[in-house]
Image: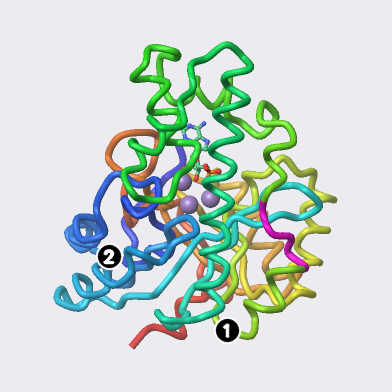
Amino acid sequence: MPDTRYQPIDLHTHSTASDGQLTPIELVQLAHQEGVQMFALTDHDTTSGLKQARNTANSLGMTFINGCELSVAWKKIPLHMVALGFEEDCAIIGKWTKKNQTVRLERGRQIADLLSKKGLPDLFDKAIEEAGGSQLGRPHFAKVMVREGIVKDTNKAFDHYLNNKKLGQIRDVWPQLEEIMPELTASKCELVLAHPKRYPLTVTKLKSVLQDFSKLGGSAIEVASGNERPDHVRFLERLSREFGFKASVGSDYHGPFGPWTQVGRFTQVHEQEISPIWYQWQT
Ligand code: AMP
Ligand code: MN
Ligand code: MN
Ligand code: MN
């Protein structure tokens, strides 16, 4: 296990507004208890938790950054892009989160149909119920599959039914970088490529993504996401320098249950060797 340690900063987290387990308020309270001073809530394709999270953070004297983890695609490969520091009523973020929310519902229907073809019962309604008004995602299907006794745990659900390979063409539903980035850059927020080592990409392909991401106005990459391997952190720090990106960090915390590192914890980065994205927000 890499050495994840207490940090006063966390710029990548999830609440019940998407697939996290804690409400925005609970999450911010926990982050505060853990010593986080600068916090971003970055739910998948929604900003609905930001107001509550910000109010809580403000009352606790923390610095709060608006965030959102957008699902996007590069040449049909799904990627995650974290937008940070936009205005809460930003129309462009609003447009694309709304669009992706529709995609999430349609994709959910497609996933349920695919699973039915594989002999499972129709899980759509149960997944919607599991999501409980938050952004429907594969983790909700995974939880239903565990509850229904179809698989032992959510990891198995992903391995056997829900990973990108198993989804086939259904993975190709998200807006292309070329389509979404020119609009988002106009909103003057920071656009961060999330957890670059978590995609099924060779180093050559990853560099090709970074080149396109840079050309299209991407400003940063995450150099540590949760318990990232220390050699991967070094590699990502090198890439951030090579491409002139700022560096972002976060736990990608989803809740107390599961493989996630604690909120406010991620593998140590080398602050002297990167351009920390958080410097602009420090007071
Ligand atoms: P979606 O946003 O619907 O594409 O689902 C992706 C989310 O599923 C990620 O953000 C993680 O929270 C979760 N996830 C991905 N892989 C796994 C896994 N092997 N086990 C449990 N959760 C996972
Ligand atoms: Mn997630
Ligand atoms: Mn992600
Ligand atoms: Mn995330």
* x and y, in percent, of residue 224 in the image: 52, 55
Q: Quadrant of residue 176?
A: bottom right
Residue drawn at x 19%, y 55% as measured from the top left: 26
- The 10 Å Cα crowd at callout 1, few under 14, some 14 to 19, many 20 or more, is some
Mark 2 lies on residue? 36
**Residue 21 sits above or below residue 250 on the image:** above
Q: CA distance from mark 1 to mark 2?
A: 27 Å
Q: Which stretch appears magenta?
A: 174-178
What element does badge 1 sit on?
Answer: loop
**Residue 24 sits above or below residue 132 on the image:** below
- The 10 Å Cα crowd at callout 2, few under 14, some 14 to 19, many 20 or more, is many
- Residue 233 versus residue 179: which sits nearer the camera? 179
- Closer to the N terminus: mark 1 or mark 2? 2
Horizontal side of 176 relative to 144 (left or right) equals right
Q: Main secondary structure of the magenta part?
A: loop
| Residue type at tag 1 | Ser
Horizontal side of 201 relative to 146 (left or right) equals right
Residue drawn at x 73%, y 31% as measured from the top left: 168
Mark 1 lies on residue? 187
- 1 or 2: mark nearer the eye: 1
User: In the picture, which quadrant includes the N terminus?
Assistant: top left
* x and y, in percent, of residue 172 in the image: 72, 45
* x and y, in percent, of residue 86 in the image: 47, 80
